Amino acid sequence: MAYRQIIYVAAFPGWIAGVTYQRSEGYRCWVLGPNQAVLNDGATYPTSQAAIAAGRLFIHHALQAELDAVVEENPEPEDQPLDRPPSS
């Protein structure tokens, strides 16, 4: 009977990434997002370091997308010329 072992777990604000190992498949990365959805890219990796790197990269891109969405919703005001007093 094949079973998976949890090899590594890392926590990030609002996110958890983990690596499992199964002898017949190799290492896989799992990501638990802020909405409690468990995500997996379906890939197997030769090492646990490669698997967790994939999870970190996914989280990095997800956080960047969230930041981009916030900036898009709340753009910074455009630069306005300063009113200058009349020259004498």
Image (cartoon, helix red, strand yellow):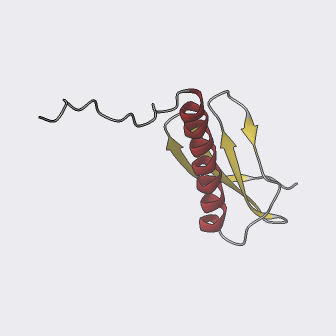
- Camera-side residue: 26 or 80? 80
Figure quadrant of residue 2: bottom right
The image shows residue 46, relative to residue 35, as above or below, that is below
For this orientation, the residue located farthest to the left is 88
Identify which residue is drawn at 61% across, 56% down. 57
Figure quadrant of residue 46: bottom right
- Camera-side residue: 80 or 49? 80
The percent position of residue 31, horizontal first and vertical second, equals 67, 44
Instruction: Answer left or right for 45 relative to 6.
Output: right
Identify which residue is drawn at 60% across, 36% down. 66
Counting the numbered discs, the total is 0
Identify which residue is drawn at 85% across, 66% down. 24
- Camera-side residue: 32 or 79? 79
Identify which residue is drawn at 80% across, 60% down. 43
The percent position of residue 14, horizontal first and vertical second, equals 54, 33
For this orientation, the residue located farthest to the right is 1
The image shows residue 53, relative to residue 16, as above or below, that is below
The image shows residue 54, relative to residue 71, as above or below, that is below
Instruction: Answer left or right for 77 relative to 61.
Output: left
The image shows residue 18, relative to residue 49, as above or below, that is above
The percent position of residue 58, horizontal first and vertical second, equals 65, 51
**Position of the C terminus by quadrant:** top left
For this orientation, the residue located farthest to the front is 88
- Camera-side residue: 4 or 77? 77
The percent position of residue 9, horizontal first and vertical second, equals 56, 48
Is residue 13 among what the camera can see? yes
**Position of the N terminus by quadrant:** bottom right
Is residue 7 among what the camera can see? no
